[in-house]
Image: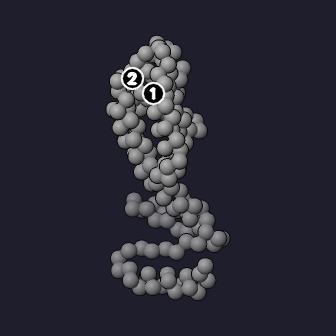
């Protein structure tokens, strides 16, 4: 771990190299305030610890967005590979997680589809590339639209096949 002098020296080195770029050193444990000036001229003060956490949250959000796009692609590929047994597939955003819901073409239980869906679930749950995502999977038999709506949240729903 670097001491205060080493951090200050590194900061001074960065500042010396920066020609037209604003650089600010934010140390989360610093009790002071950071001044933020927006392009539109707005200026506001925020606790340094809050500014540091906001920066951390932005990085996590970028990672989450990347993982979410990768998840959408993976689910889409899975649906295409299993289209013969799937009537429809949905990704719904719930309060604390997401649900990937597949509706079988038939009313009878499809063991092969269920096994493949379980494999997909394990692959996503154990995949480091999806470590920020909490996904549940479910296969249901062919049902009416009213019954289907009971499984879908009132929030955002992505439809894969219909």
Q: Is mark 2 on a helix, strand or loop?
A: helix
Judged left or right of residue 60, residue 73 is left
- Residue 129 position in % (x across, y down): 46, 52
- SS for callout 1: helix
How many marks the image carries: the answer is: 2
Q: Mark 1 points at which residue?
A: 112
Q: How far apart are marks 1 and 2 (CA)?
A: 9 Å
In this view of the protein, can residue 10 be seen by the observer? Answer: yes
Q: Which residue was labeled with disc 2?
A: 85
Residue 151, horizontal then vertical, whole percent: 53, 23
Residue 28 or 69: which is nearer the viewer? 69
Tell me, for residue 17, which label it has, or none.
none
**Which residue appears at 39% of the width and 24% of the height?**
86
Q: Do the residues labelled 1 and 2 touch (CB within 8 Å)?
A: yes
- Residue 64 visible in the snapshot: no
Graded by Cα atoms within 10 Å as few (under 14), some (14 to 19) or many (20 or more), the crowding at tag 2 reads: some
Kindly identify the residue that appears in the image at 40 percent across and 18 percent down: 105
Location of residue 67 in the rendering, given as x and y in whole percent from the top left corner: 44, 49
From this view, report whether residue 25 is shown above or below residue 49: below
Q: Which of marks 1 and 2 is nearer the N terminus?
A: 2
Image height of 36 relative to 100, above or below:
below
């Amino acid at each position: 771990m670097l001491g205060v002098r080493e951090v200050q020296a590194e900061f001074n080195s960065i500042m010396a190299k920066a020609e037209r770029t604003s650089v600010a050193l934010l140390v989360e444990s610093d009790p002071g305030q950071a001044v933020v000036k927006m392009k539109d001229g707005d200026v506001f003060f925020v606790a340094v610890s809050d500014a540091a956490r906001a920066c951390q949250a932005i990085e996590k959000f970028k990672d989450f967005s990347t993982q979410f796009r990768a998840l959408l692609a993976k689910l889409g590929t899975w649906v295409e590979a299993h289209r013969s047994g799937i009537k429809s597939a949905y990704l719904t955003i719930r309060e604390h997680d997401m649900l990937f819901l597949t509706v079988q073409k038939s009313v009878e239980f499809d063991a092969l589809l269920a096994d493949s869906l379980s494999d997909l679930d394990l692959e996503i749950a154990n995949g480091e590339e999806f470590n920020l995502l909490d996904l549940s999977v479910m296969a249901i038999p062919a049902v009416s639209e009213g019954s289907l709506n009971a499984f879908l949240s009132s929030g955002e729903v992505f439809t894969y096949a219909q």
